[in-house]
Each structure stands twice: as C-alpha cells, then as structure tokens.
Amino acid sequence: MPGVEKRTEEWKPLRELPITWVTLSELKPHERLNNEELKGFIESLTSSGIFWLPLLISKNEKIIIDGHHRWKGLLELGAEKAPAVMVDYADPEIELGIWFPLLSKDKTTFLEALQKASITTKIVKDRNEAINEVHSGKASFAIVGKENEEAVLVYNKPEACDMLVKIEGESIVYIDTESAALAEVDNEEAKFAIIRKPLSKDSVRRTCSKGEVFPAKSTRHILPFTFQKIDVKINEIIPNFSNKEK
Ligand code: ADP
C-alpha cells in the first residue's frame, strides 16, 4: 500500500444515495495516479469479482472527487460505464481539505535531496513563521518540526513535495488535518510534517478543465456523510471479463 491514511474525522451518518451509471471516458481526474494503488485495486476487483464502492463524481463538471484508481482500473479492464454517486460540487456541504504527509527520516536526508535537485530552500526560525508563509500563499510548502525548531520553506515548487514523499517511502503516513499533523510531531510520532497550501474547489475545476492534475494524494474531499456500499458483479460492468482473463 502506497502510504497510510490516518484520519481524525468523527463518525458520519450513512446516506442512501441514487446510483448512476456514468461513462468513464467522460470523467475528469484531478490527481496523478499511483501505480501500486492501481494494481491493488485491479487485483482486488478481479479476485473478488465484485465492485463494492461507487465512484464519487461531480454532477455538472464530471470531476472525479473520489475514485481515481477505480476509474483507471475499470478503463484498463475494458469497462465503459460504472456505478457512481453524483453530487453537486458547488454544495458547501462538500468541503475540500488536503493531506499532510509526515516524515520520519533525518532532516539532512530531505535537505540534501532538495539541494541535489537545485531546489532553493529558506530556513526560518520557527514553524509558525513557516506556516504563515505557506498560508499566505507565498511558499509552496514547509517542512516543520516542533514549535521552536527551525523550519524549511520551499517556494514555487509544489511538486518537490512528491520527491520528499518518495524518499520517506511506501510506509509514509498522511494525516487529515494540519493540527493533527503538528500534534504528531509534538508527540514524537513523526519528526516533521509537510504543511502545504490549502486548495480551493475553483483550483480543482481550473486544473481539470486544463486537462492537468495535482500530485497524488493532494486533495481530501470531506463529506458530512458516508454513502452506501454496492454489490455489483464485475460482469455487469465488463460483460466479457471472464473471456478476456482466459
Ligand atoms: P483515489 O483515492 O485516488 O480517488 P480510489 O478511491 O479509486 O482512488 O482508490 C482505490 C479504492 O478502491 C480504495 O479506496 C479501495 O477501497 C477501493 N476498492 C478496492 N477493491 C474494490 C472493489 N473490489 N470494488 C470497489 N472498490 C474497491
């Protein structure tokens, strides 16, 4: 599994929502895919023969809110349509958060990698200063440790974050809120947290409409509810699936 998600979210009520069969080629991804996760989904689907989690799609823009690997995996297996839950992306009930990667290796490992890639960094005296610089939109991201420790800022290179994530490795932990990320550092569960710029729904719309994508594991869409699981046989999605496998 490429990274571990750690959530601090509370329990959410279950909503039964209508299932719509969407045309996969019309959907717009907004995040880069991870090959391991793609392989994992294909393996899970083909071995169980059941598709149990509908895609989550924005009704008007056809943006994939959740389900990038399901979408790509189904396309690769030859599917044309798939079951989805449709929501109105403009609905304020749907919020957009981000994931905060946690780092446990030594700071020099990350700093050396940034230096080697000719990425300019700026060291500031504490993490609050660094976080303000990211929140104000000036810096792309910050690598922060405990409150009074020096922090590292990276400007104009949001994709450099991917490099650090890769260095941290497969077992990297992503946590769902900034305060939880800082608490992990304070409790010494991690050495550093990467604090990234918050994203807006408009930036997701703009990125999609240009045919571009964000790095993997950037966005975290937050719904105030969960929705039902389904039980759709693979042959209902890919009619000639078993023939193909033989
Ligand atoms: P992303 O999180 O990038 O949008 P996905 O949500 O599609 O991508 O990631 C793969 C998801 O597929 C996992 O959340 C996993 O729960 C789900 N999954 C695994 N096996 C199946 C299956 N047989 N049917 C439906 N969903 C599955």
Image (cartoon, grey):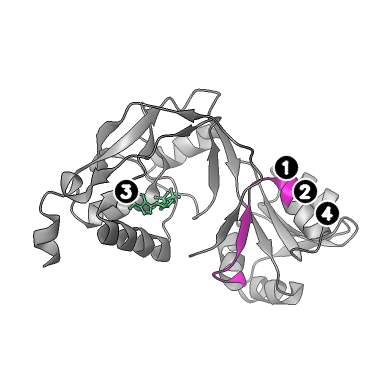
In space, the residues marked 2 and 1 are separated at their CA atoms by: 6 Å
Residue type at the position of mark 2: Ile
Point out residue 232 in the picture as x, y percentages from the top left corner: 25, 43
Residue 59 covered by magenta stretch = no
Given this view, does label 3 or label 4 mark the residue nearer the observer?
Answer: 3
Q: Tell me which segment is drawn in magenta.
A: 168-180
Residue position marked by numbered label 2 in the rendering = 131
Q: Are marks 1 and 4 in contact (CB under 8 Å)?
A: no
In space, the residues marked 3 and 1 are separated at their CA atoms by: 32 Å
Residue 238 appears in the picture as rendered: yes
Q: Is residue 215 left or right of residue 11?
A: left
Point out residue 219 in the picture as x, y percentages from the top left corner: 54, 45
Point out residue 126 in the picture as x, y percentages from the top left corner: 87, 56
Q: Are marks 4 and 2 in contact (CB under 8 Å)?
A: yes
Give me the disc on residue 107.
none
Q: Mark 1 or mark 4, which has the lower sequence index? A: 4
Q: Is residue 116 left or right of residue 143?
A: left
Secondary structure of the residue carrying numbered label 4: helix
Residue type at the position of mark 4: Arg
Q: Residues within 10 Å of mark 1 (few under 14, many from 20)?
A: some
Q: Are marks 2 and 1 in contact (CB under 8 Å)?
A: yes
Give me the disc on residue 71.
3
- Nearest the viewer among 8 and 149 is 8
In space, the residues marked 1 and 4 are separated at their CA atoms by: 12 Å
Q: Is residue 38 left or right of residue 95?
A: left
Residue type at the position of mark 3: Trp
Q: Note whether ligand 1 is within 8 Å of mark 3.
A: yes
Given this view, does label 3 or label 1 mark the residue nearer the observer?
Answer: 3
| Residue 220: quarter of image | top right
| Residue 32: quarter of image | bottom left
In space, the residues marked 2 and 3 are separated at their CA atoms by: 35 Å
